[in-house]
Amino acid sequence: MHVCIYPIYICSYHWILLILFVETGNLIVFDSMRNPKSAIQHILEPLNRVWKKFVKNNKGRGQWRSELNVNMDYPCARQQQGTDWCGYYVCDYLHIMTPCGKATDEDTRMSQMGDECYSTDQINAVCEQLAGFILNEILDPRGEFYHDGHIHRGLPSTS
């Protein structure tokens, strides 16, 4: 089982997905605007500090590199100039990378994220999937992530 962490980073209204593969220390950056590494350096530096602390605190439990290996050149959809589709791209990347428990290898999932622009139909499909998830899993009282809006507090201790 591969352990991945999927932080979403939003900078000046632009969404970027970072995927940290814990076993290898690889950090893949999915940025549909293809910004240079310097544009997200202010988030990479704290991530590297946390990574170094993790490696130090877990010596002997694994063979981790001392610094994160940041890959900014991984193929992903290219955002068309003048659009605000980066949020949809991030949702789609997450959908591809977390296949609901289906056993697929990372190379197959990554290959689904081509270096082309999404069509309006593809963006609409992502919107429909997200809206369906919200309706079925969050708003429906039978949904896995439904919350009735009340804060439920535990009963006071009787001891």
Image (cartoon, rainbow, N blue to C red):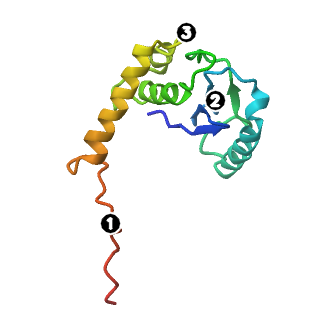
Q: What amino acid is found at the position of numbered circle 2 in the picture? A: Asn
Q: Nearer the viewer, mark 1 or mark 2?
A: 1
Q: What amino acid is found at the position of numbered circle 3 in the picture? A: Glu
Please tell me how crowded label 1 is: few (under 14), some (14-19), or many (20+) other residues with Cα within 10 Å.
Answer: few
Residue 29 image point, x, y percent = 63, 27
Q: In terms of sequence position, does the residue under pointer 1 or pointer 2 come before the other?
A: 2
Residue for badge 1: 150
Q: Choose top left, top right, bottom left or bottom right for residue 32.
A: top right
Residue 15 image point, x, y percent = 59, 33
- Name which residue lies at 72% across and 38% down: 44
Q: Choose top left, top right, bottom left or bottom right for residue 38.
A: top right
Is residue 13 positioned above or below 152 on the image? Answer: above
Instruction: Compute the Cα span from label 1 to label 3.
Output: 45 Å
- Name which residue lies at 64% across and 33% down: 25
Q: Is residue 99 left or right of residue 60?
A: left
Residue for badge 3: 116
Residue for badge 2: 26
Give the residue furthest to the front.
82
Q: Nearer the viewer, mark 2 or mark 3?
A: 3
Please tell me how crowded label 2 is: few (under 14), some (14-19), or many (20+) other residues with Cα within 10 Å.
Answer: some
* Mark 1 residue element: loop
Q: Nearer the viewer, residue 159 or 44?
A: 44
Please tell me how crowded label 3 is: few (under 14), some (14-19), or many (20+) other residues with Cα within 10 Å.
Answer: few
Give the residue furthest to the bottom.
159
Residue 43 image point, x, y percent = 71, 40
* Mark 3 residue element: loop
Q: In terms of sequence position, does the residue under pointer 2 or pointer 3 come before the other?
A: 2
* Mark 2 residue element: strand
